[in-house]
Amino acid sequence: MTVAPEQVPHALAPVSARVEALLGRRWHTLCELGDLRPGRGVAVLLPDGRQVAVFLDRAGRAYAIGNQDPFSGAYVLARGPLGSAGGRPYVTSPPRGRRFDLTDGTCLDDAAVSVPAYTVRLR
């Protein structure tokens, strides 16, 4: 029996790419593309102890930002819901409800605060 790719449950779909982020001066593999669900995030622990929140939006674009909410200190940004304001994709921090731009890490509710943002590629 042959199944069309769009009929394969996401969990069984073949992994077509790795999600990598430019951290410092070198690329690091964060996860497999198949580990991500559109509209949701995952937390990745790097060998140096940093946590990165990785997201796949519903259009298939991947983003990576620091996972720590600078207002609460909790590592929770990967659990926040995604949204868009004025064409800017963001994640909302669960404990405080503050929104962080996924492209540059800027807090949309307090421009003086930001989280690290990383260049992402699918490879």
Image (spheres, grey):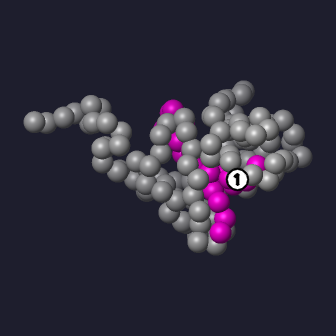
Return the residue found at the far left.
Answer: 1
In the rendered structure, the answer to whether residue 5 lies left or right of residue 2 reads right
Image coordinates of residue 101 in percent, x first then y, are 72, 41
Q: Residue at left 71%, top 38%?
A: 94
Total tally of numbered discs in the picture: 1
Return the residue found at the far right.
Answer: 112
Is 63 placed above or below 108 here?
below
Residue 86 figure quarter: top right
In the rendered structure, the answer to whether residue 121 lies left or right of residue 115 reads left
Where does label 1 land, which residue? Answer: 75
Which quadrant would the N terminus be assigned to in this image? top left
Image coordinates of residue 117 in percent, x first then y, are 69, 53
Which quadrant would the C terminus be assigned to in this image? bottom left
10 Å crowding of disc 1: few (<14), some (14-19), many (20+): some
Image coordinates of residue 27 in percent, x first then y, are 55, 66
Judge by depth and name the residue closer to the eye, 51 or 117.
Answer: 51
Q: Amino acid at mark 1?
A: Tyr
Image coordinates of residue 46 in percent, x first then y, are 59, 66
Is 87 placed above or below 106 here?
above
- Is residue 117 shown to the viewer in this render? no
In the rendered structure, the answer to whether residue 50 lies left or right of residue 20 reads right
Q: Residue at left 67%, top 29%?
A: 84
The verdict on residue 116 being magenta is: no
Q: Residue at left 63%, top 34%?
A: 82
Judge by depth and name the residue closer to the eye, 86 or 66.
Answer: 66
- Is residue 3 shown to the viewer in this render? yes
Could you tell me which secondary element the residue under label 1 belongs to?
Answer: loop
The verdict on residue 61 being magenta is: yes
Q: Residue at left 71%, top 28%?
A: 85
The span shown in magenta is: 49-69
